[in-house]
Image: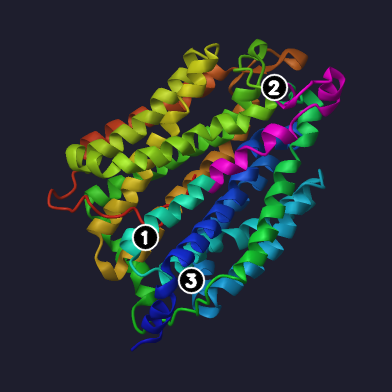
Amino acid sequence: MSQDQEHSQATAPDGKSVRGRLFLMMVLQFFIWGAWLPLIFAYLPGIGFTPWQTSLILNAFPVAAIVGMFFSNQFADRNFAAEKFLAFSHLVGGLAILGCGFTRSFWPFFLLMLVHCLLYVPTISITNSIAFANMKDATKEFGLVRMGGTIGWILAAWPFTFIFVDWAKVKEAAPSGFVDWLGTVLASPLTDKALLDATKWTFIVAGIASLILALYSLTLPHTPPKRAVSGNDGLAWMDAVRLLKHPFVLVLWLVTFIDAFVHNCYFNWTGGFLGASRQAGGVGIPGNWVMPVMSVGQIAEILTMFVLGVTLKNLGWRWTMIVGILGHALRFLVYALLPENQNLIILVQILHGICYAFFFATVYIFVDAYFPKNVRSSAQGLFNVMILGIGALVANSICPWLAENVFVQGAGAEKTINYRSMFLFPSAVATLAAIALALFFHPPKNLDTQTDPGSAPAH
């Protein structure tokens, strides 16, 4: 009996307890990311960072993702007990992201963010490794465990409904009774400079969650380092890359880059757009409600994943992915043309979950179905380089500059963002990507569409 089999059997009698612990691990893992990411895009220019400084900070994560795909994920998997590496990474990474809440100087902020991201990115695959190593039937159990990550991202939005509150105003209103008090709190958001100053709490909350996960990691089941498989580890990447010679694989890989770029335009621009006043062309969502509104997309993602299998069976690979891409186009079109319709803008956040599940999750399923088993992990990494790395890298590099220099109207003190032209741009890009997929992506018709989406990261 192998060591892995012995380990699996050791955890089997306590299956439900282990699943619950793994679920909580996933909740905390993605709570951290979901706490700081949505508002950082407007926060950095708000505290005086230039577009190039903003881009450097934002690109710490995709750079770490690219490094992780080719080196750090495998290095961590092979050399350390997974739960101990998780504890170390979240201890040091948690202190780093915590530090971002206490500095407004560029170089300290950038270096702290870089340290955090370099340590955080490998933990995405490490948590998957811990989960797979400690489940009796990963095919049946992993989907439920992994859903904890999406729930963690959603939960990260809600503390700020109370953190971004003007408590002096609440005190002055002197509400009577809990219901009256709660209504006053939720209707008393911070604004302007006070809101900007309070945004530092996104990093502090993320840091606290990371430190909690560092401690919690030490209670997780022991997951020893994976033994290196002799022979082909170094060649698996090459074998995966060689499959790009097939036109339909290459087309999907390139369209994945475009969709990842458009996906990250959403994160770059949506928070600022939702919070901007109607006079400035925005939606006018109160500052303490921006993150909960954005979390509607993750709620929709959970619901969409339940119908993804049926959708794939009825529409097939190509049209399921096209629906996912066109979701971006429609959402940005609504942003551009109907910003004054606040209820519709909130409702259209549902499309974020559809975009994610119908394209990104479907890509992971497709890779699992098409690529040979011996290169499947490397092939997932190949597409992850586009999804978490290069697509985000390009978006984070040009979106701050576009917002500052291209999609603007007026001058001097009267200068504002032209949200209409800003959002028509990614809408057009997404439409072109959908057309390219419709015309040039022709996968084999005999691929199984019932595969589990596996380790698709929440986003």
Question: Which residue is identified by label 1?
Answer: 141
Q: In this view, does 292 lie above or below 309?
A: above
Callout 3 amino acid? Gln
Which element is circle 1 on? helix
Specify the label residue 74 is tagged with. 3
Instruction: From the top left corner, tell me how far across and down residue 313 is, in percent.
Output: 19, 43
Q: Quadrant of the N terminus?
A: bottom left
Q: Foreground mark, 2 or 3?
A: 2
Which segment is the magenta one?
152-181
Locate residue 335 relative to residue 453 in the image: left or right: right
Which element is circle 2 on? helix
The single residue placed furthest to the front in the displayed view is: 177
- Earlier residue among tags 2 and 3: 3
- Earlier residue among tags 2 and 1: 1
Residue 214: name its quadrant.
Answer: bottom right
Question: Which residue is identified by label 2?
Answer: 183
- Earlier residue among tags 3 and 1: 3
Distance Cα–Cα, label 3 vs label 1: 24 Å
Count residues near mark 3 (Cα–Cα under 10 Å), then give few for <14, some for 14-19, many for 20+: some
